[in-house]
Amino acid sequence: MIDFFYAGLGLVILLLAGDSLVKGAVNMSLRLGVPPLIVSLTIVAFGTSAPELLIAVQAVEDGAPGIALGNVVGSNTANILLVLGVPAIISGLHTSECETRRNYVMMIFGTLVFIVLCFLGPITWVHGLVLLALLTFVLVDAFRAAHSHRQDAKGCASMAIEDEEELEGADPGLPVWKIAGFMLLGLIGLPLGADLLVDASVNIARSYGVSETVIGLTLVAIGTSLPELATTVMAALRRQADVALGNVIGSNMFNLLAIIGIASFVGPMPVPAQMLQYDIWVMLGASLLLVPFVFRDMNITKNWGVALTGLYVVYVASVLL
Protein backbone atom coordinates (compact mmCIF):
# COMPACT_ATOMS: atom_id res chain seq x y z
CA MET A 1 0.00 0.00 0.00
CA ILE A 2 2.92 2.35 0.64
CA ASP A 3 3.75 2.28 -3.08
CA PHE A 4 0.22 3.35 -3.97
CA PHE A 5 0.58 6.21 -1.49
CA TYR A 6 3.86 7.32 -3.07
CA ALA A 7 2.36 6.98 -6.56
CA GLY A 8 -0.59 9.15 -5.53
CA LEU A 9 1.69 11.66 -3.83
CA GLY A 10 3.92 11.83 -6.89
CA LEU A 11 0.90 12.37 -9.13
CA VAL A 12 -0.46 15.19 -6.95
CA ILE A 13 2.97 16.88 -6.89
CA LEU A 14 3.22 16.54 -10.67
CA LEU A 15 -0.18 18.08 -11.32
CA LEU A 16 0.35 20.97 -8.91
CA ALA A 17 3.88 21.61 -10.16
CA GLY A 18 2.77 21.53 -13.80
CA ASP A 19 0.00 24.03 -13.10
CA SER A 20 2.42 26.24 -11.15
CA LEU A 21 4.99 26.19 -13.97
CA VAL A 22 2.39 27.09 -16.59
CA LYS A 23 1.06 30.00 -14.52
CA GLY A 24 4.54 31.36 -13.85
CA ALA A 25 5.79 30.93 -17.42
CA VAL A 26 2.68 32.44 -18.99
CA ASN A 27 2.81 35.57 -16.84
CA MET A 28 6.56 35.96 -17.20
CA SER A 29 6.28 35.71 -21.00
CA LEU A 30 3.48 38.27 -21.14
CA ARG A 31 5.50 40.66 -18.95
CA LEU A 32 8.41 40.29 -21.38
CA GLY A 33 6.10 41.29 -24.22
CA VAL A 34 5.62 37.88 -25.86
CA PRO A 35 2.22 37.86 -27.66
CA PRO A 36 -0.51 35.67 -26.09
CA LEU A 37 -0.76 33.71 -29.36
CA ILE A 38 2.88 32.59 -29.13
CA VAL A 39 2.49 31.80 -25.43
CA SER A 40 -0.55 29.58 -26.02
CA LEU A 41 1.10 27.69 -28.89
CA THR A 42 4.35 27.03 -27.06
CA ILE A 43 4.62 27.61 -23.31
CA VAL A 44 1.12 26.54 -22.34
CA ALA A 45 1.19 23.53 -24.66
CA PHE A 46 4.56 22.32 -23.39
CA GLY A 47 3.81 23.26 -19.79
CA THR A 48 0.60 21.25 -19.59
CA SER A 49 2.47 18.26 -21.04
CA ALA A 50 5.34 18.65 -18.56
CA PRO A 51 4.12 15.91 -16.15
CA GLU A 52 3.93 13.32 -18.94
CA LEU A 53 7.30 14.47 -20.30
CA LEU A 54 9.06 14.20 -16.94
CA ILE A 55 7.52 10.76 -16.35
CA ALA A 56 8.74 9.57 -19.76
CA VAL A 57 12.27 10.88 -19.23
CA GLN A 58 12.46 9.50 -15.69
CA ALA A 59 11.11 6.11 -16.79
CA VAL A 60 13.68 5.77 -19.58
CA GLU A 61 16.49 6.81 -17.22
CA ASP A 62 15.33 4.20 -14.69
CA GLY A 63 15.31 1.46 -17.33
CA ALA A 64 11.50 1.25 -17.48
CA PRO A 65 10.67 2.49 -21.00
CA GLY A 66 7.43 0.50 -20.92
CA ILE A 67 6.02 3.09 -18.51
CA ALA A 68 6.96 5.92 -20.90
CA LEU A 69 5.34 4.31 -23.95
CA GLY A 70 2.41 2.96 -21.96
CA ASN A 71 1.73 6.38 -20.47
CA VAL A 72 1.55 8.06 -23.88
CA VAL A 73 -0.53 5.37 -25.61
CA GLY A 74 -2.79 4.96 -22.58
CA SER A 75 -3.22 8.72 -22.14
CA ASN A 76 -4.20 9.19 -25.78
CA THR A 77 -6.81 6.44 -25.50
CA ALA A 78 -8.10 7.84 -22.19
CA ASN A 79 -8.23 11.37 -23.61
CA ILE A 80 -10.72 10.33 -26.29
CA LEU A 81 -12.82 7.70 -24.55
CA LEU A 82 -12.77 9.00 -20.97
CA VAL A 83 -11.95 12.71 -21.19
CA LEU A 84 -14.63 13.27 -23.86
CA GLY A 85 -16.99 10.58 -22.59
CA VAL A 86 -17.45 11.76 -18.99
CA PRO A 87 -18.22 15.43 -19.82
CA ALA A 88 -20.63 14.27 -22.54
CA ILE A 89 -22.52 12.24 -19.93
CA ILE A 90 -22.76 15.34 -17.74
CA SER A 91 -24.07 17.82 -20.29
CA GLY A 92 -23.30 16.66 -23.82
CA LEU A 93 -20.76 18.29 -26.15
CA HIS A 94 -22.02 20.39 -29.07
CA THR A 95 -19.12 19.45 -31.32
CA SER A 96 -21.14 20.20 -34.47
CA GLU A 97 -20.19 23.85 -33.91
CA CYS A 98 -16.43 23.13 -33.82
CA GLU A 99 -13.92 23.58 -36.62
CA THR A 100 -11.21 21.09 -35.76
CA ARG A 101 -10.79 19.21 -39.05
CA ARG A 102 -7.30 20.47 -39.84
CA ASN A 103 -5.87 19.65 -36.40
CA TYR A 104 -7.69 16.32 -36.30
CA VAL A 105 -6.16 15.24 -39.62
CA MET A 106 -2.73 16.16 -38.25
CA MET A 107 -3.42 14.13 -35.11
CA ILE A 108 -4.34 11.07 -37.19
CA PHE A 109 -1.25 11.52 -39.36
CA GLY A 110 0.95 11.83 -36.27
CA THR A 111 -0.65 8.69 -34.83
CA LEU A 112 0.07 6.72 -38.03
CA VAL A 113 3.68 7.94 -38.10
CA PHE A 114 4.10 6.87 -34.46
CA ILE A 115 2.67 3.41 -35.23
CA VAL A 116 5.06 2.96 -38.15
CA LEU A 117 8.01 3.97 -35.95
CA CYS A 118 6.87 1.48 -33.29
CA PHE A 119 7.16 -1.35 -35.81
CA LEU A 120 10.60 -0.03 -36.80
CA GLY A 121 11.57 0.03 -33.10
CA PRO A 122 13.17 0.19 -30.69
CA ILE A 123 12.45 3.91 -30.78
CA THR A 124 15.76 5.79 -30.77
CA TRP A 125 16.87 9.38 -31.22
CA VAL A 126 16.64 8.92 -35.00
CA HIS A 127 12.92 8.18 -34.69
CA GLY A 128 12.70 11.04 -32.21
CA LEU A 129 14.02 13.46 -34.82
CA VAL A 130 11.20 12.43 -37.15
CA LEU A 131 8.59 13.06 -34.44
CA LEU A 132 10.09 16.41 -33.43
CA ALA A 133 10.29 17.51 -37.10
CA LEU A 134 6.59 16.72 -37.45
CA LEU A 135 5.90 18.63 -34.21
CA THR A 136 7.73 21.65 -35.61
CA PHE A 137 5.56 21.53 -38.73
CA VAL A 138 2.39 21.31 -36.61
CA LEU A 139 3.42 24.30 -34.48
CA VAL A 140 4.34 26.43 -37.49
CA ASP A 141 1.09 25.53 -39.23
CA ALA A 142 -0.94 26.30 -36.08
CA PHE A 143 0.83 29.65 -35.71
CA ARG A 144 0.14 30.59 -39.33
CA ALA A 145 -3.52 29.55 -39.08
CA ALA A 146 -4.01 31.48 -35.84
CA HIS A 147 -2.18 34.53 -37.21
CA SER A 148 -4.30 34.45 -40.36
CA HIS A 149 -7.45 34.19 -38.28
CA ARG A 150 -6.37 37.20 -36.21
CA GLN A 151 -5.60 39.23 -39.33
CA ASP A 152 -9.09 38.46 -40.67
CA ALA A 153 -10.59 39.75 -37.43
CA LYS A 154 -8.30 42.75 -37.11
CA GLY A 155 -11.23 45.11 -36.78
CA CYS A 156 -11.56 44.29 -33.08
CA ALA A 157 -9.21 46.64 -31.21
CA SER A 158 -9.60 44.78 -27.92
CA MET A 159 -8.66 41.38 -29.37
CA ALA A 160 -5.17 41.25 -27.86
CA ILE A 161 -6.54 42.19 -24.45
CA GLU A 162 -9.26 39.53 -24.71
CA ASP A 163 -6.72 36.91 -25.79
CA GLU A 164 -4.56 37.74 -22.81
CA GLU A 165 -7.48 37.55 -20.40
CA GLU A 166 -8.62 34.18 -21.80
CA LEU A 167 -5.13 32.68 -21.79
CA GLU A 168 -4.83 29.92 -19.23
CA GLY A 169 -3.01 31.11 -16.11
CA ALA A 170 -2.79 34.77 -17.18
CA ASP A 171 -3.05 37.30 -14.35
CA PRO A 172 -2.00 40.85 -15.35
CA GLY A 173 -1.76 41.92 -11.69
CA LEU A 174 0.54 39.12 -10.52
CA PRO A 175 3.72 40.49 -8.84
CA VAL A 176 7.12 39.48 -10.23
CA TRP A 177 8.12 37.68 -7.02
CA LYS A 178 5.02 35.50 -7.25
CA ILE A 179 5.74 34.73 -10.90
CA ALA A 180 9.27 33.63 -9.96
CA GLY A 181 7.88 31.58 -7.07
CA PHE A 182 5.42 29.74 -9.32
CA MET A 183 8.19 28.90 -11.81
CA LEU A 184 10.56 27.75 -9.06
CA LEU A 185 7.92 25.51 -7.48
CA GLY A 186 7.16 24.01 -10.87
CA LEU A 187 10.81 23.36 -11.72
CA ILE A 188 11.42 21.70 -8.34
CA GLY A 189 8.13 19.80 -8.12
CA LEU A 190 8.08 18.25 -11.59
CA PRO A 191 11.21 16.08 -11.29
CA LEU A 192 10.38 15.22 -7.67
CA GLY A 193 6.84 14.10 -8.56
CA ALA A 194 8.03 12.17 -11.61
CA ASP A 195 10.67 10.34 -9.59
CA LEU A 196 8.14 9.34 -6.90
CA LEU A 197 5.50 8.21 -9.40
CA VAL A 198 7.84 6.20 -11.63
CA ASP A 199 9.61 4.43 -8.75
CA ALA A 200 6.31 3.57 -7.07
CA SER A 201 4.80 2.38 -10.36
CA VAL A 202 7.74 0.05 -11.02
CA ASN A 203 7.42 -1.38 -7.50
CA ILE A 204 3.66 -1.90 -7.95
CA ALA A 205 4.22 -3.67 -11.27
CA ARG A 206 6.78 -6.00 -9.72
CA SER A 207 4.76 -6.76 -6.59
CA TYR A 208 1.60 -7.62 -8.56
CA GLY A 209 3.41 -9.48 -11.30
CA VAL A 210 2.22 -7.23 -14.11
CA SER A 211 4.35 -5.51 -16.72
CA GLU A 212 5.52 -1.92 -16.43
CA THR A 213 3.72 -1.28 -19.71
CA VAL A 214 0.38 -2.26 -18.16
CA ILE A 215 0.97 0.12 -15.24
CA GLY A 216 1.80 2.87 -17.73
CA LEU A 217 -1.32 2.13 -19.79
CA THR A 218 -3.64 2.23 -16.78
CA LEU A 219 -2.53 3.78 -13.46
CA VAL A 220 -0.09 6.36 -14.85
CA ALA A 221 -2.14 7.14 -17.97
CA ILE A 222 -5.36 7.79 -16.06
CA GLY A 223 -3.52 9.93 -13.51
CA THR A 224 -1.84 12.13 -16.09
CA SER A 225 -5.14 12.53 -17.98
CA LEU A 226 -6.83 14.09 -14.94
CA PRO A 227 -5.91 17.71 -15.90
CA GLU A 228 -7.42 17.22 -19.36
CA LEU A 229 -10.51 15.65 -17.78
CA ALA A 230 -10.97 18.58 -15.40
CA THR A 231 -10.50 21.10 -18.22
CA THR A 232 -12.95 19.28 -20.49
CA VAL A 233 -15.62 18.95 -17.79
CA MET A 234 -15.45 22.71 -17.15
CA ALA A 235 -15.57 23.41 -20.90
CA ALA A 236 -18.63 21.19 -21.25
CA LEU A 237 -20.41 22.95 -18.39
CA ARG A 238 -19.62 26.31 -20.02
CA ARG A 239 -20.88 25.01 -23.40
CA GLN A 240 -17.40 25.42 -24.91
CA ALA A 241 -17.20 22.21 -26.92
CA ASP A 242 -14.46 23.63 -29.14
CA VAL A 243 -12.22 24.00 -26.09
CA ALA A 244 -12.96 20.43 -25.00
CA LEU A 245 -12.34 18.83 -28.39
CA GLY A 246 -9.37 21.06 -29.19
CA ASN A 247 -7.80 20.27 -25.80
CA VAL A 248 -7.96 16.53 -26.48
CA ILE A 249 -6.66 16.74 -30.05
CA GLY A 250 -3.81 19.05 -29.06
CA SER A 251 -2.87 16.96 -26.04
CA ASN A 252 -2.75 13.77 -28.11
CA MET A 253 -0.48 15.35 -30.71
CA PHE A 254 1.93 16.62 -28.06
CA ASN A 255 1.98 13.25 -26.30
CA LEU A 256 3.05 11.42 -29.44
CA LEU A 257 5.32 13.99 -31.05
CA ALA A 258 6.90 15.95 -28.20
CA ILE A 259 7.05 13.49 -25.31
CA ILE A 260 8.19 10.41 -27.21
CA GLY A 261 10.40 12.58 -29.41
CA ILE A 262 12.26 14.12 -26.47
CA ALA A 263 12.37 10.93 -24.36
CA SER A 264 14.01 9.07 -27.26
CA PHE A 265 17.14 11.18 -26.74
CA VAL A 266 17.48 9.88 -23.18
CA GLY A 267 17.68 6.26 -24.28
CA PRO A 268 16.21 3.67 -26.67
CA MET A 269 12.64 2.53 -26.01
CA PRO A 270 11.87 -1.07 -27.04
CA VAL A 271 8.19 -1.45 -27.97
CA PRO A 272 6.54 -4.38 -26.11
CA ALA A 273 4.86 -7.03 -28.27
CA GLN A 274 1.56 -6.49 -26.44
CA MET A 275 1.55 -2.86 -27.49
CA LEU A 276 2.29 -3.70 -31.13
CA GLN A 277 -0.46 -6.29 -31.23
CA TYR A 278 -3.18 -4.50 -29.29
CA ASP A 279 -2.76 -1.16 -27.53
CA ILE A 280 -1.61 1.06 -30.41
CA TRP A 281 -4.51 -0.24 -32.51
CA VAL A 282 -6.97 0.56 -29.73
CA MET A 283 -5.47 4.06 -29.62
CA LEU A 284 -5.91 4.42 -33.40
CA GLY A 285 -9.43 2.99 -33.27
CA ALA A 286 -10.41 5.41 -30.50
CA SER A 287 -9.01 8.30 -32.56
CA LEU A 288 -11.03 7.25 -35.60
CA LEU A 289 -14.22 7.23 -33.51
CA LEU A 290 -14.07 11.03 -33.65
CA VAL A 291 -14.56 11.09 -37.45
CA PRO A 292 -18.37 11.61 -37.39
CA PHE A 293 -18.04 14.35 -34.77
CA VAL A 294 -15.33 16.17 -36.70
CA PHE A 295 -16.50 15.71 -40.29
CA ARG A 296 -20.27 15.04 -40.08
CA ASP A 297 -21.19 17.83 -37.66
CA MET A 298 -22.51 15.40 -35.05
CA ASN A 299 -22.74 16.24 -31.35
CA ILE A 300 -21.29 13.99 -28.65
CA THR A 301 -24.59 13.39 -26.88
CA LYS A 302 -25.09 11.81 -23.46
CA ASN A 303 -25.66 8.42 -25.10
CA TRP A 304 -22.40 8.75 -27.00
CA GLY A 305 -20.73 9.75 -23.73
CA VAL A 306 -21.96 6.55 -22.09
CA ALA A 307 -20.71 4.53 -25.07
CA LEU A 308 -17.24 6.13 -25.07
CA THR A 309 -16.82 5.77 -21.30
CA GLY A 310 -18.04 2.17 -21.45
CA LEU A 311 -15.52 1.36 -24.16
CA TYR A 312 -12.75 2.75 -21.97
CA VAL A 313 -13.84 0.61 -19.00
CA VAL A 314 -13.82 -2.46 -21.28
CA TYR A 315 -10.35 -1.55 -22.56
CA VAL A 316 -8.84 -1.11 -19.08
CA ALA A 317 -10.41 -4.41 -17.98
CA SER A 318 -8.95 -6.19 -21.01
CA VAL A 319 -5.48 -4.82 -20.23
CA LEU A 320 -5.58 -5.77 -16.54
CA LEU A 321 -7.18 -9.23 -16.90
Image (spheres, grey):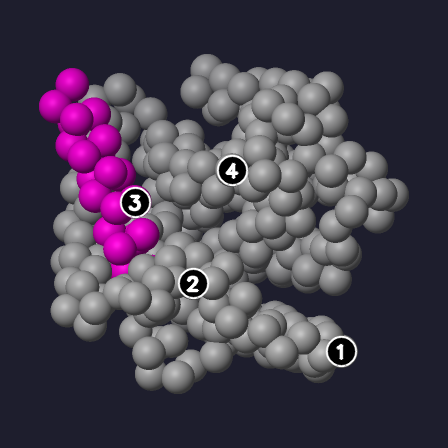
Which mark, residue 152? 1
Which mark, residue 165? none
What SS does tag 4 mark? helix
Q: Are marks 3 and 2 in contact (CB under 8 Å)?
A: no
Q: For the point 16% across and 18% down, which residue is it?
A: 1
The stretch in magenta equals 1-22
Residue occupied by mark 4 = 234
What SS does tag 3 mark? helix
- Mark toward the start of the polypeptide (1 vs 4): 1
Residue 279 horizontal/vertical position (percent): 55, 36
Whether residue 239 can be seen here: yes
Residue 101 horizontal/vertical position (percent): 77, 56
Q: Foreground: 63 or 154?
A: 154
Q: What secondary structure is the stretch in magenta mostly built from?
A: helix
Q: Are marks 1 and 2 in contact (CB under 8 Å)?
A: no
Residue type at tag 2:
Val
| Extreme-front residue of the structure | 157
How many residues crowd mark 3 within 10 Å: few (<14), some (14–19), many (20+)?
many
Which mark, residue 44? 2
Q: For the point 44% across and 20% down, which residue is it?
A: 320
Whether residue 191 can be seen here: no
How many residues crowd mark 1 within 10 Å: few (<14), some (14–19), many (20+)?
few
Gap in Å between the C-alphas at discs 1 and 2? 24 Å
Residue type at tag 3:
Leu
- Mark toward the start of the polypeptide (3 vs 1): 3
Residue occupied by mark 3 = 15
